[in-house]
Image (cartoon, rainbow, N blue to C red):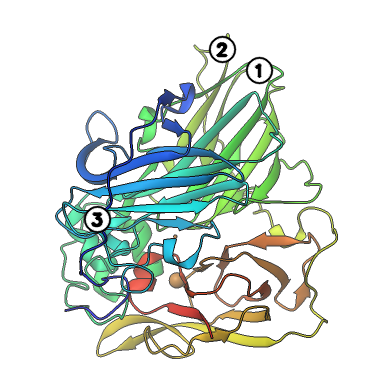
Amino acid sequence: GHAGHDMGADQSATQQPAAPSQPMTASGDNAMEVLTGNTFTLTAKESMLHLDDQTMKTAWTYNGTVPGPQLRVKQGETISVTLKNELPEPVTIHWHGLPVPNNMDGIPGVTQNAVKPNESFTYRFKVDVAGTYWYHSHQNSSRQVDKGLYGSLVVEPKTPEPADKDVTLVLDEWMQDDSMAEMHGGGGSMAGMNHGADHAAPATSAASGHDMANMSDAKMMPLMYTIFSVNGKTGPAIAPLRVKEGEKVRIRLINAGYLSHKLNLQGHAFQIVSTDGQPLHNPPLTSGQLLNIAPGERYDLEFVANNPGTWLLEERSDNPGAKSLAVPIVYEGYEAAQAKPESGQLPVIDLTRYGEAAQSSFSLEQPYDITYRMDLNTDSRDGQMVFTINGQTFPNVPPLDVKKGDRVKVTIVNNSPEDVHPMHLHGHFFQVLSKNGQPVSGSPLVKDTLNVLPGESYVVAFAADNPGEWMFHCHDLGHAAKGMVSEVKYA
Ligand code: C2O
Ligand code: CU
C-alpha cells in the first residue's frame, strides 16, 4: 500500500446520475474538440494515440483523445462535469489553476475519494476567474498525466476580448520506450516510498551510450522523453496554424508535460498578454526572445499576422526531442512554402522584468500575518533520489498553517544543484514580489505555477481566502511523487 495523497483512498465515490452530453464543435486549425455550455461528461478511458503515422501509444484519455476536449465556459457560470471512469484504476479531475471550492479540487484522500473503475462523480462549481486553465487526474498523477489524462479549460471573460484566431496548444513529451516510465516516479507514491524501479529499466536508443544509473533526473529526463507533442501530434503531424494577413492571433500555451519548453515565434513580434490565466499590465511587444514554459504553466500570446509567408513556432531547447516540436504558421496563399528552423542562441524572457508596474494588492514591505519559507532540494535516501521541502518528503513536510483572512508571504528557494522546480499552489493565485532579492518590476505578476531554477529564490504573497486543505507542490510530477509536496491548511 502507498501512503501518499496521490495514490489516494480507494473508497467508493458518490454515485451520481450522468449529465446529458453537450453539443460539440470542431475548432478548425488545431483539431482539438471544443465543448461549450455548462454541463459536460468526461469519460476516462484507454485509447490509441497516433502521435504520427508511425508512432502510436496506448494512452489514458478523457473522451478518447489526448488532450481531452477543451471545455470552453463563460465567467460567472456554474458548470457541472461528470467524470465517468472506464479505466482499470481510480482517477480524479483536478482543475489546475482554477480557484474552486476545496471539495471540488480532485485530490484523492483529501478532498474526495478517487473515482473507482465503473463509477462516476460530478464536479460542480462556479467559474469566477477568466483565463486559460487545464484539467488533469490527480490520482497517481506522475503516471496518469504522463499517459494522457489531461485537457484544457478556457474561461471566457464576461466582456469578451475576441481575436480573429484563438488556438490552444497543449505541449507534452513521450518516451520511445514506455518501459522507462518507472524511472521518473512512474510507480512512485507521493510519499516517496516506492523506488524499487528506479534505474532498473533498460536504456533506450536515445539514451544508450549514457550511463543512466549515475545520471541526475535533470540530465536523464530529456534523454528519456524524446518525442515532443502539440495537441497529441508530433513533428510533421502537428497541425499548422492557418492565418490571413491582418488577423489578430491568440495562442494559449499549456505545458502538460515534465520538461520545460523554450519557444521561438519566427517572423513576428508578440505580446504575452497573460500567464496562468492572469493578465499582464501593458505587455511590451517582444521578438528575438524565447518564451520558457515550465510544467503546469500557461501563457497566452498575441500577435498580428503582418508578415506573409510560412513560419514556425519552434522549440529551441537543446535537448534531443526539440526538433519534433514545431507548429507551422501558414498564411493564406503561402501553403506551398516551407518554413525553416532557425538557429543560434536567443535570450529567454524574464517575466519579472516584463510588463509595466501597476497597482497591486501586495508589496514586499507591508506586514504579513504568516511568513513561510520553502527550501527545495534534491537528496538521496537509502540509495534512492528524493526531492525535499525543508529537508523532508511528503507527508512529513510541515504544512503552511493559515486561517481565513491571513495575508501570507512565502519565500521559495531552490537549492537543488540541477533540478528545476515549477511550484504549483492549488486553490489560490499568488503574486510574485521578488526574484533573487530584486523586486519584480513587471508587477503585479500573478501566477499559480512558478518556475524556480537551481539557485533561484523568490518571494510570493497570497490572500488566504479559500478555506480547505490545498496542495503546494512541484509540478514536475516525478519530483512530487518522490516527496516534493507541501500543503496549505486552514485552521
Ligand atoms: Cu496540476 Cu496538483 O496539479
Ligand atoms: Cu521539482
Q: Which mark is residue 308?
A: 1
Mark closest to the chain's N terminus, 1 or 2: 1
| Mark 1 to mark 2 CA distance (whole Å) | 8 Å
Q: Secondary structure at mark 1?
A: loop
Q: Under tag 2, what secondary structure? A: loop
- Label 2 or label 3, whichever comes before in sequence order: 3
Q: Nearer the viewer, mark 2 or mark 3?
A: 3
Question: Which residue carries the number 3 mark?
Answer: 15
Question: Is residue 72 toward the left or the right of residue 264 in the image?
Answer: left
In the rendered image of this protein, does residue 225 appear above or below residue 103?
above
Depicted 339 relative to depicted 74: above or below? above
Q: Position of residue 355 (x, y in %)?
A: 79, 53
Does residue 222 appear to the left or right of 127 in the view shown?
left
Relative height, residue 412 to residue 211 (above, below): below
Q: Alpha-carbon distance for marks 1 and 3? A: 54 Å
Answer with the quarter of the image where residue 52 lies: top left
- Identify the residue at image location x=18%, y=59%: 89
The reply to whether the C-beta atoms of the residues labelled 1 and 3 are less than 8 Å apart is: no
Q: Quadrant of the N terminus?
A: bottom left
Residue kind at label 3, given as amino acid type: Gln
Observer able to see residue 277: yes
Residue 211 in the image: above or below residue 28: below
Q: Residue furthest front?
A: 17
The C terminus - image quarter: bottom right
Q: Label 2 sits on what residue type?
A: Tyr
Amino acid type of the residue tagged 1 in the rendering:
Pro
